[in-house]
Image: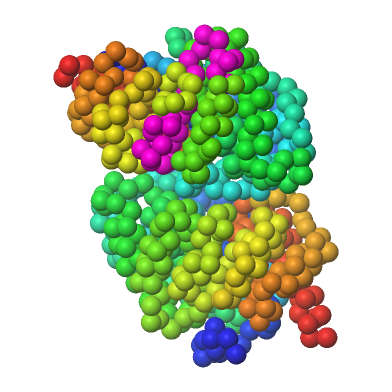
Amino acid sequence: MRPSVDKLKALGLNLPIFPTTSVGSFPKPDYIKKARAKREKGEISAKDLLQLEERATREWIEFQEKIGVDVLVDGEMYRGDMVAYFAEELKGFSGGSFVRSYGNRYYRKPVITGQVVWEKPMTVEWWKKAQAMTKKPMKGMLTGPYTIMDWCFNEYYKDREATCMALAQVIRKEVEALIDAGAKIIQVDEPACSVRPSELPLVIKSMNVVTQGLPAYFVTHICYGDFGKIYPEMTEIPVENFDLEMSNSENNLLDCFRSRSFPKDLTAGIVDVHNHELESQEVLGARLRQILEVVPAEQLWIDPDCGLKTRTVEEAKQKLEATVRAAQALRKSYSN
Amino acid sequence: MKLKLANHSHYPKIGETDEQHKLRRAYHLFDRQKITQDQVLEAQKETIQEVIEEQQKAGVDIVTDGQIRWNDPLSHLMKSLEGVEIGGLLRFFDTNFYFRQPKIVGPLLKKASLLKDEVAFLKKVSKGESKAVLTGPYTLALLSQIETPAYKSVEEVAQVLTEILAEEVKELAEARVSHIQIEEPGYALVQPNWTWAQASLATLAEQKGKSKLWLTTYFGDSVPFYSKLQELPVDVLGLDATYSDKLLGHIQKEGSDKELALGLLDGRNTKLENSKESAKALHSLDQVLKNGVCYVTTSCGLEYLPRDKAFKKLQLLEDIKREYQRGA
């Protein structure tokens, strides 16, 4: 049996073959978008917004349960951007302004203006609320130190390494707080990890600070990068599971895994989250069969390529449901 | 030496105010079929006018149109070519900005002018010198995915793109744009065959007319291939001075046969540089660049910064020039 399966069992988690999950974010329903805008203008209270965020979180959890997702996420109804959220919660940052990431998509890029300090848990209360809404495992969702460093402007630390290692210390504190609260699967996203291949050792070193010796099954999500330049070394990042976008590049990543087999668990993204078009079950089945030619079945988890927040609520639901249906069909064919 | 201040290339499309969000709103509404293509075009034109005004207000001598109509440095040019399909998102070098990767699926053919309308508008609304920007053939080829047996290598694709872009350079020169910037950040990623690069730029230079032809690299240390860049047949070499603290010393030692455009200010970080130190760095090159013009700019386009910070970086160029002249 693979060590990662042992770890899951030791944590009391008994997942089916081809576990299904999501990368993290779901689109916010219109009532949340409107409420957030009103909150910014001071037209509603924080409590009013919180109630609506809880309602939206519950709706997404109910949807995931209804369609049969195995490892759930809270959908991040209370977060804006994956880096800005932590920048708002940690000391040492000032609020950023809009920067474009692609097409007509913008995010607020934070600025590090002082020493970063973890003052209190940032995600734990939400994790507890979400876990209380389901009996299925709820992932703890964090952004990794390297990505926070890379996606912020830095006006304080002397260089990238000093910034990244300072952030690793604060993210570890959050991981410890999640574990104390009962989280067993924790995802620490590092989508920036392929940005500078020469800095991969820094990604590994900082993730080691985050995960070393802690009793949880760790996942990292990495997307839209040049994996050819960091594979297989990237698998030294100390986590059990790599959640990778596969469909965006039409499974081209498999070329890497053919040259050297993928040594850890792989959560394969099988639907494109930047496209309105809903992939057919035939397409998803073909993608999965292609992956299974290279990756052993017991290592494979399944999800969409990336966070679904870029889609409309309806599109996101359709894409997630299609993902789960494809996984269930595969599971059925394996049990036969 | 004489300093001229230049905007590097792109500029933030939106800012913090409601008015500065008009283009984002227009794309959003167009996506939902609530406004027409002409209305989007109008929003683009208004934004271009605003960003040109901002550059002029900051004291920039050579303005661009901010590449406001571009989604990214690859797909904007490649989408107009026959033989290209636009594919998935890929990170642009080591930034947190993503481009849609062109897929070369057949023989490449230029169907229509790529930038004619954009440059005509830039000329119409700007005063003084202006610069048109083209992603270079090598970078376009290097970052595209070749999916056709028609081409066997990046060099083959780059060669065809050279010929296509040469036609474009000719049109830009005929439109009397003062400067044409060929951007080749790919040189720092994977160095090209330099004999090929010389021939490629010679093909482009043949069509430049009275315009000044710039070759600009960024996102990497150009010290290892500085001597190769000096041999290229261009008027101006644009260099990113933020990646290596050795570049200015290297220029001081090796000199320059060409006019230089020095990217002294970090176009990717909000921290504002010390203008006195930048002016001092420029003075260190006085002896080697004494007879020429030195263009002072940012390390790369400014769209990686928020709009207000981009404006401050441009204003800082003016401060540097003032400091430089004070110390002359």
Q: Nearer the viewer, residue A148 or B223?
A: B223
Question: Compared to A73, does B102 lie above or below?
Answer: above
Residue found at x 69% / y 20%: B113
Residue found at x 49% / y 41%: B191
Residue found at x 47% / y 47%: B94
Look at the image and say whether residue A166 sits in the magenta stretch. Answer: no
Magenta span: B204-229
Residue at the far front in the pictured view: B195
Classify residue B182 as left or right of residue A112: right
Q: Position of residue A3 (x, y in %)?
A: 53, 86
Q: Position of residue B219 (x, y in %)?
A: 43, 40
- Where on the picture, by quarter, is residue B78? top right
Look at the image and say whether residue B224 sits in the magenta stretch. Answer: yes
Q: Position of residue A227 (x, y in %)?
A: 56, 59
Q: Nearer the viewer, residue A68 or A296?
A: A296
Residue B166 appears in the picture as rendered: yes
User: Which image quarter holds the N terminus of chain B?
Assistant: top left
Question: Compared to A146, does B105 lie above or below?
Answer: above
